[in-house]
Amino acid sequence: MAIKTITSPLAGYEAQRLTPEFERAEAARHRSPTPETDRVSLSEEGRRKAAVLTAAAEADGVRAHKVAALKAQVAAGTYAPKSEDIAAALVRHDLDLWG
């Protein structure tokens, strides 16, 4: 018995060779004509919130020195409000809302 051709069982799975021209064409195809940039789009509600925050920051009622001192205490881990004061403020706030 004579065996004339023997093919490798992996012949169908050989890696395809890419030419440099094909690789350049593929790279150009995937490149966008203009570089993509991140964009932010605010809703109307977002614009209103930003305006309110800006107005609050510029208002005379905000005591910047007190806010800065509280931020420093929080950052240092020394801020320790009294629970009685917090409870009283919550009750006052609720009473203002309801009556």
Image (cartoon, rainbow, N blue to C red):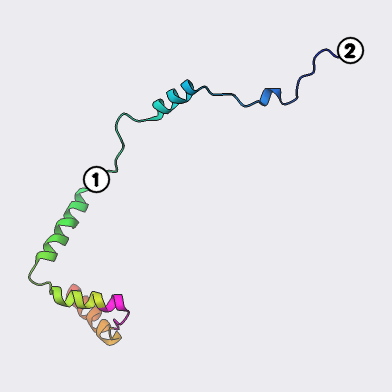
Classify mark 2: helix, strand or loop: loop
Q: What's the residue type where badge 2 is placed? A: Ala
- The tag on residue 23 is none
Quadrant, the N terminus = top right
User: Which residue is depicted at the point 52% across and 22% down?
Assistant: 19
Quadrant, the C terminus = bottom left
Q: Is residue 28 left or right of residue 10?
A: left
In the depicted view, which residue is nearer to us: 98 or 41? 41
* Above/below status of 31 relative to 67: above
Q: Which residues are magenta?
A: 73-80
Where residue 66 sits: x, y (%)?
Answer: 16, 77
Q: Residues within 10 Å of mark 1 (few under 14, many from 20)?
A: few
* Picture quadrant of residue 38: top left
Q: Is residue 82 left or right of residue 55?
A: right
Which comes sooner in the sequence, label 1 or label 2?
Answer: 2
Q: Are marks 1 and 2 in contact (CB under 8 Å)?
A: no
Q: What's the residue type where badge 1 is placed? A: Ser
Classify mark 1: helix, strand or loop: loop
Where residue 77 sits: x, y (%)?
Answer: 32, 79
User: Which residue is depicted at the point 65% across and 25% down?
Assistant: 14
- The tag on residue 41 is 1
User: Which residue is depicted at the point 59% across and 24% down?
Assistant: 16
In the depicted view, which residue is nearer to us: 6 or 74? 6
Q: Which residue is mark 2?
A: 2
User: Which residue is depicted at the point 9% across and 67% down?
Assistant: 59
